[in-house]
Amino acid sequence: MRQCLFGEDQLAGFANKNPVAIVESEKTAILVSALKPDYTWLASGGLHNLNPAMFIALKKCKIQL
């Protein structure tokens, strides 16, 4: 089992169309996805959870952190 970003499952359909934005909180990702649908919103679940392994799924995506 490996830790992944909240919302990572959305990448299958939207990664090629929308840039990816990463925020800290899952709640923030849900709220801003309604306000700015032109991004695919993901959440790390806390700053301490960020590590290089979490970004493997994002290697072909344009990212804003």
Image (cartoon, grey):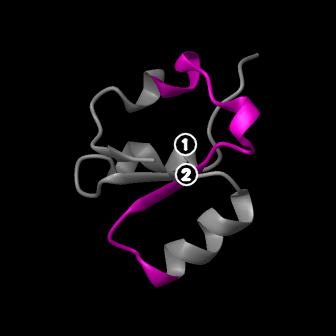
Numbered label tally: 2
Q: Left or right: 3 with respect to 65? A: right
Q: Which residues are magenta?
A: 35-55
Q: Left or right: 47 with respect to 19? A: right
Q: Residue at x 71, y 56 (%)?
A: 25
Q: Residues within 10 Å of mark 2 (few under 14, many from 20)?
A: many
- Point out the residue furthest to the bottom here: 35
- The vertical placement of 9 against 29, above or below, is above
- The label on residue 42 is 2
Q: Secondary structure at mark 1?
A: helix
In contact (CB < 8 Å): disc 2 and disc 1: yes
Q: Amino acid at mark 1?
A: Glu
Residue 38, image x, y percentages: 32, 71
- The label on residue 8 is 1
- The vertical placement of 9 against 50, above or below, is below
Mark 2–mark 1 distance (CA, rounded to whole Å): 6 Å
Q: Residues within 10 Å of mark 1 (few under 14, many from 20)?
A: some
Q: Quadrant of residue 9?
A: top right
Q: Quadrant of residue 45?
A: top right
